[in-house]
Amino acid sequence: MFAPSQSQNNNLANNKSNNDNEGFCLDANQNVFVRVKCDFCDNDAKFACARCEASWSCCELHGSYHQLPGACAPFKVCRSNAVGRYVIANRDIKAGEILASENPLIVGPNQESKPICLGCLAEIDVSYLCERCGYPMCDKDCSNSPEHLQECEILRRGPRPNFSNDSINTEAYHCILPLRVLLLQNQDVSRLLLQFMDHREGREGSDYWKTSQKFVVDHLRETLKFDQFSQDDIHRIIGILEVNSFELHSYGNSGYRGVFGVGSLLSHACSANAKILFGKEPPFASKLMATTDIAAGEEIVTSYLDPLQSTLKRRNLLKTGWKFECICQRCLDPTELNTHLGAFFCPRCTANTQKTSIIQPTQAGELICPDCLYQVQTDEYLQLMDKFSEKIKYTSTEERYNVDSWLELIQEADKYFPKTHQVHQEISRWLVPILCRGYSKTFADFPIDQVILKLALARRYLNLLDKVEPGLTRNRVKTIFEVVDVTLFLIQDKLNTGCKISNQDVSEFYGTETNMDNIITDLSKNIDEMIFIFIKLGAHSGFEVWISQQIPILKQRLNLIKNSL
């Protein structure tokens, strides 16, 4: 769609065959040519979009980011001294719209990983090693693939690395993605990558700086004799990758990451409005999708980490990994948009008076009890959270389907945290899908108090998602299903007794004051939302496929209830 513009008005270029005019456009008001830069790099522009005549590029690749099938991309790239480049909507955008379709500029294995093929990036064992460099590969075809051949010529200069099927290699994979960037032949890709910030000031002297010095810089320059790039050059590439890469896929103990021309431009927000849908097979074609409605002029943002973590945890991770202090609306609100994810019981009040005074972290991160004024040390609080995170990790790994283990963990968490806390919400994420479910069983086969608990956990978790992970997400569609499924059962169970359902009845099991008309309306909207999310995201896991198959049944159950009221 990109071609030299033929327009001579509206401040657009009269693109002539003479290269001397490249990078200039005619200012109709002043009747002079002014320099125009590419939207995505600092090069002079050569092409204007022939459709909208409002976007400029220096090459076909950079111009492709402005193109969607039959339309122009609904965003523009802006620049500021504070954050560098960022992206804003140039028109109103609806949730579910695709904003960009792109392949990663560069892709490769995570820094530390179990064996992974350097050709197709599949998870593998060590039964086949590249004959030249000794890295694990799927087979000879992958070892001779274009993705690997060039780097192989460099890697073969060093000693063969040691790999095991059962352990994570903490050394050999660090250098792969930086080496791939340094070996790039496509200057349009290289130029785009070098536009990204590397945050050297924040990284220098850090633990990973020392690790990358040993396993990337020194390994490439000294061990492999790949010394045509300076230490500073290599550290810059490492920084660009560390700050701007996304993990495209994780196998658990292995995975791969990549940098995107558009997706990696997005700033972080702890409650995002867009998400990258990563491709899982080469060339890893991915889409940037709006997860909520976005107004014209609003910044398009994504989340770099799990948004279900509390502010103290998120800000620490962002400072460590991405070298910035987040000042989004959620981080500046001590209540975290009224989610209270970080609030916990004062240990002194609990021990001395049995009073459940709640400590709410301040904007500055201080942890002071409003009643006894006792100040909890941040490290002490984070250690407590880490202890529960380890317990959740163990239970999800070793006892994932053991409901009693999860219920015991809830009882233990109750001693330290209100029900709104991150720890309780993490437990709900794992427990809700398995609670009151079993082979050939229905909700009627379980104690009614457990069924009501399942609804309470699901509704509380959904309320959290409304604020910190709004819009079109897989978390949301699965949680909505649980709420609808249990609510329909409880209503039908009451109707089966022959009793009329009062507003008090529905308010009791719904956990808030409401009435039947409101619940029926909400359930209908919930089902429509589930359909819309699956249309936009698809159903990938077995559980998601099963949920999508249950939607027509949910609609039938809802209609039966409507007809019986």
Image (cartoon, grey):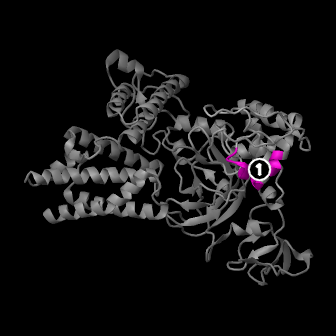
Q: Point out residue 333 in the picture as x, y percentages from the top left corner.
A: 50, 42
Q: Which residue is mark 1?
A: 148
Q: Is residue 105 visible?
A: yes
Q: Is residue 188 left or right of residue 378?
A: right
- Residue 20: x percent and y percent? 92, 75
- Percent position (x, y) of residue 218? 84, 33
469 horizontally vs 155: left or right: left
43 over 113 or under it: above or below: below
Q: Residue at x 53, y 63 (%)?
A: 294
Magenta-drawn stretch contains 150: yes
Task: Residue lying at the far left in this picture: please name it.
Answer: 498
Give left or right: position of 532 versus 96: left
Find out whether residue 243 is within the magenta segment: no
Which residues fall within the magenta stretch? 137-152
Residue at image position (79%, 81%) is 28
Question: How dense is the environment of label 1, judged by Cα within 10 Å: few (below 14), some, or many (20 and up)?
Answer: many
In front of the other: 541 or 519: 541
Please, what is the three-letter code of the amino acid marked with disc 1?
His
Q: Which part of the image, by quadrant, shows the C terminus?
A: bottom left
Q: Secondary structure at mark 1?
A: helix
Q: Is residue 526 visible?
A: no
Would you identify the image quadrant in which residue 202 lies? Answer: top right
* Front-most of residues 162 and 10: 162
Residue 216's image quarter?
Answer: top right
Which quadrant is home to the N terminus?
A: bottom right
Type of secondary structure dominating the magenta stretch = helix
In-front residue for pair 478/519: 478
